[in-house]
Amino acid sequence: ESGLLPEIPYRPSKPKTITNPLIKISNSTKSLHTEPKNQMNQKEGVT
């Protein structure tokens, strides 16, 4: 049990490093989803 206590302070820092890449991925996926929508909007505007 005492061995688990030292790991607790380190765990909060690890999720931050893990979430940063996830945020970048989510942002990239958002851009991928928004770009096709913009293209569709442009096509609709042309027609």
Image (cartoon, rainbow, N blue to C red):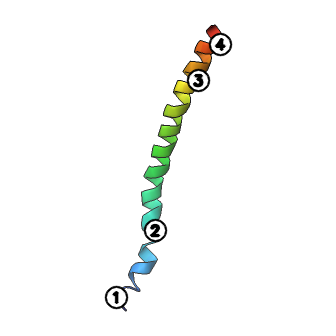
- The quarter of the rendered structure image containing the C terminus is top right
Distance CA(mark 2)–CA(mark 3):
37 Å
Mark 3–mark 1 contact, CB under 8 Å? no
Which amino acid type is marked by label 2? Ser
Measure the alpha-carbon separation of dots 3 and 4: 10 Å
User: Residue 15, how many percent across, how many down?
Assistant: 45, 64
Q: What residue does disc 4 label?
A: 45
Q: Position of residue 17 (x, y in %)?
A: 43, 59
| Precedes in sequence: disc 1 or disc 2 | 1
Q: Amino acid type of disc 1?
A: Gly
Q: Which residue is denoted by mark 2 in the rendering?
A: 13
Which class describes the residues within 10 Å of circle 1: few (<14), some (14-19), or many (20+)? few
Q: Residue at x 50, y 49 (%)?
A: 23
Residue nearest the observer in this picture, 2 or 40: 40
Q: Residue at x 45, y 51 (%)?
A: 22
Which one is earlier in the sequence, the residue at label 2 or at label 4? 2
Give me the C-alpha separation between circle 1 and circle 4.
63 Å
Kind of residue sitting beneath label 4: Gly
Residue 38 placement (x, y as % from top left): 58, 23
What residue would you read off at disc 1?
3
Q: Quadrant of residue 14?
A: bottom left
Label 4 SS: helix
Which badge, 3 or 4, is on the more N-terminal residue? 3
Separation of marks 2 and 4 at Cα, in angstroms: 48 Å
In the displayed orientation, state which residue is furthest to the bottom: 2
Residue visible at 42% across and 74% down?
10
Quadrant containing the N terminus is bottom left
Q: Which residue was labeled with disc 3? A: 38
Q: Nearer the viewer, residue 46 or 6?
A: 46
